[in-house]
Amino acid sequence: MSDYKNDRQIIGFIRENQEKLYRVAYSYVKNEETALDIVQDTIVKVLQNRHTLRNKEFIKTWGYKILINECLMYLRKNKNMIYFDNLENYTQQLTSEAPDSDKIDLYNAVDKLPPKLKTVIILRFFEQLKLDEIASVTSTNQNTVKTRLYKALKMLKLDLDIPEDDINL
C-alpha cells in the first residue's frame, strides 16, 4: 500500500512539473528535441530509482537534481554540438510575454555563465526555488549557493553593463 502511495506521489510530481523540467532542460541545451529527450531520460531515472528516495517531501529537489545532472552530462558528452534554436523561440519558452531586447540580453548573459553559476540563476529566478532547495539540488551547502548566486549576479551586472547603484544584491 505505501509503495502504491509513493508511486502516485512521484507520478503526480512528474505530471505537475513536466513543463518546468522541460524549461530547465531547454535553458541548458537550446534545442527542443534534445530537451525533450533529457526530460524523458530524467523521468525514466526518477521512476527507476524511486525506491532510493527516502523522504517524499524532497521529490521536487530530487527530481531537479536528476534533471540538472542529465543536462550537465549531456553537455559534457556533446560540448562541441550545442544547438541554438531561434533566440525568439527561446525567450518565448521562458516567458509567456513577447521578448524585448533587455530580456534577450539577459538570456544571452545567463548563457555565458559557468554551469554552476548558471544552475543557481536558473533555479532561483526562472524556477523560483528557495536557496535551501537549490542547495539540495546542487548537493552543496546553502552558503555555497549564496556565494554562487552573488557571484553570478555580479557577473551578470558586469556583462549587462548595469551601474552598481541600480541593482542591490
Image (cartoon, rainbow, N blue to C red):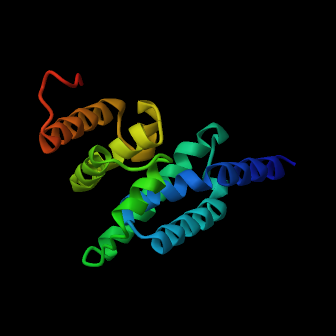
Q: Is residue 52 shown above or below 33?
A: above
Q: Residue at x 42, y 70 (%)?
A: 31
Q: Tell which of 33 and 47 is nearer to you.
A: 33
- Left-right relation of 80 to 125: left
Q: Tell which of 69 and 97 is nearer to you.
A: 97
Q: In which quarter of the image is the C terminus?
A: top left
Q: Is residue 148 shown above or below 109?
A: above
Count every numbered label the image shows and give the total: 0
Q: Return the residue found at the far right.
A: 1
Q: Residue at x 49, y 74 (%)?
A: 33
- Left-right relation of 7 to 91: right
Q: Tell which of 148 and 101 is nearer to you.
A: 101
Q: Which residue is drawn at 23% across and 22% down?
A: 168
Q: Tell which of 25 and 143 is nearer to you.
A: 25
Q: Which residue is drawn at 25% across and 78% down?
A: 80
Q: Is residue 20 shown above or below 154?
A: below
Residue 72 seen from this side: no
- Left-right relation of 151 to 47: left
Q: Residue 28: give x, y in percent of width and height.
A: 37, 60
Q: Which image quadrant for residue 134?
A: top left
Q: Which image quadrant for residue 111?
A: bottom left
Q: Residue 84: give x, y in percent of width and height.
A: 33, 70
